[in-house]
Amino acid sequence: MYWNEKYECMPREQLEELQLERLKATVERAYHNVPHYRRLMQEKGIEPSDIQSLEDLRKLPFTTKNDLRENYPYGMFAVPLSEVVRIHSSSGTTGKPTVVGYTRNDLNVWAELMARSLTCGGATKNDVIHNAYGYGLFTGGLGVHYGAERIGASVIPISGGNTKRQVMIMKDYGSTILTCTPSYALYLAEVMEEMGVRPEDLKLKCGIFGAEPWSENMRKEIEKKLPLIALDIYGLSEIIGPGVAMECPEKNGLHIFEDHFIPEIIDPVTEEPLPYGQFGELVFTTITKEALPMIRYRTRDISALYKEPCSCGRTLVRMARVSGRTDDMLIIRGVNVFPSQIESVLLEIGETEPHYQLIVQREGSLDTLEVQVEVSERLFSDKVRRLEELENKIRAEIESTLGITVKVTLVEPKTIQRSEGKAKRVIDKRRI
Amino acid sequence: MKVKQISVFLENKSGRLAAVTRVLGEEDINIRALSIADTSDFGILRLIVNQPEKAYRALKDHGFTVSMTDVIAVEMPDQPGGLAEVMAVMEEHNLNIEYLYAFIGKVPNGALVIFRVENIDEALKILEEKGITVLSGEKVYSL
Ligand SMILES: [Zn+2]
């Protein structure tokens, strides 16, 4: 099912023509209206007229979150504030927040992309969309909301929190589509079980989950606990919000809405573009955004691109589910550690999604890494020896994967904090 | 002739054992015997109670990691050499004991030992053949 067949299934040649035309216009606008872009392009000796093919994209400089911070709050806007009709912002937990603005047309495009995404998950005007993404400065809530309204579906703007009430509403109002973070979906399932609400009493058919990386195992677990097919949606406020890419029911990567964004994968260290199929850092160039055009924005998300056509009929390039962040990386005793590496070890041992937390501490001048893992009923044994074997097995596997020593501690279930937004996997207690 | 034992995973931090006993108390469950095996960061509490199914459900509902396993309750004379006789039989037949714990009193002969063995059916057969008194679950729960 498509929302906009013309663009979602456009022949590649035609799509690329459209992209080039839109890219040229974007570069032109960015050069003339955003001093930051003009300065960077001049430093590289590039003029807008140098962009004559899609390959010429590579000549352009990268943009990072840092550029947005340095130009805080409105310095990267390409239109006067009078034309900006909405402002969103990141939380700014790791520095100055990044501010993003939308013109009326930007909001229009965003609603269109969310309508496409929801339709991709099977939503029609007859659906009841239970939107548990946060409303506010975060783009998730309002992004889904306007997309749902565009389709004509009934949207329940419940936002995050108050989980017991969410379960009650889901049951009583007959929600058919759930939109939230995947970890919140699991939490909803847990609370449902505690409340004695049976999944078969719900009308859910599809869950559209995003805003944090998640795994295939997590999908299986959600689908086992909730009566729905779980699909991945991708987006980030700097590019537009949710709806940059959406997984179709083929569950074979997320279709990037390329008539609005041009994706690239680069090696995060050398910054060189990587071929299709190779994992690296995802980079986007917006080609229709008016208020905040982004040129080669480095997302820090790790993914890969696939060009082979999808059996759903969409001709758009697909991206692999985001498998981690280039800046999630911890450096422990000089070793690069990605939480996703530890997660995959735990997944192999436990088969289902583990709840775990990494605690980094500094004792004297030595960094220590403790991996706390919740003991599930499946892993539990009444024999001390078995549990010690389990601890040792986890420890040995992690040590052989990472090449550093770690301490593994088994903890009681539900003692690791459940988040209603992104799962917090790392507690860094180092004082440097 | 098997006895149901409840095992609970406990982190080594204050209040966890109290939490378990509170849940059992509230549910009106009586503890017949208990033992704790602990390491530096966790412990396993093992319980024989009057209503194992109910205890299992209650603890699970309160978020504990619980398992229910079959163990053997052996009655023996409360006198020197009482346990030795049973152990000799176990050893002679290569019955691998994972762990055991004892409780005294309330049975005619005086002492009761709970055994967790690898092959419970084989162990039961041998113990009975050797004339050792094995108590049924019902009997143990109602002691
Ligand atoms: Zn598809």
Image (tube, rainbow, N blue to C red):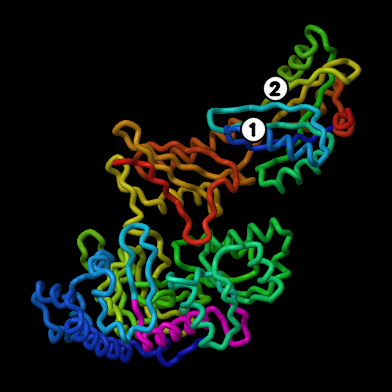
Which residue is drawn at the image coordinates 61% and 63% (left, top)?
Answer: A162
Say whether residue A387 is magenta. Answer: no
The chain that hosts pointer 2 is B
- Tell me: A272 left or right of B123: left
Q: If you read the primary sequence from the N terminus, does the residue marked by circle 1 or circle 2 appear first?
A: 1
Nearest to the observer: residue A86 or residue B44: A86
Whether tag 1 and tag 2 are in contact, CB under 8 A, the answer is: no
Q: Nearer the viewer, mark 1 or mark 2?
A: 1
Query: Eyeballing the image, is A408 above or below A36?
Result: above
Which residue is drawn at the image coordinates 70% and 36% (left, top)?
Answer: B7
The amino acid pointed to by label 2 is Asn
In the rendered image, which quarter is residue A126 located in?
bottom right
On-image quarter of the N terminus of chain B: top right
- Residue position marked by numbered label 2 in the rendering: B94
Nearest to the observer: residue A52 or residue A362: A362
On-image quarter of the C terminus of chain B: top right
Which region of the structure is painted magenta? Answer: A101-129
- Residue position marked by numbered label 1 in the rendering: B44
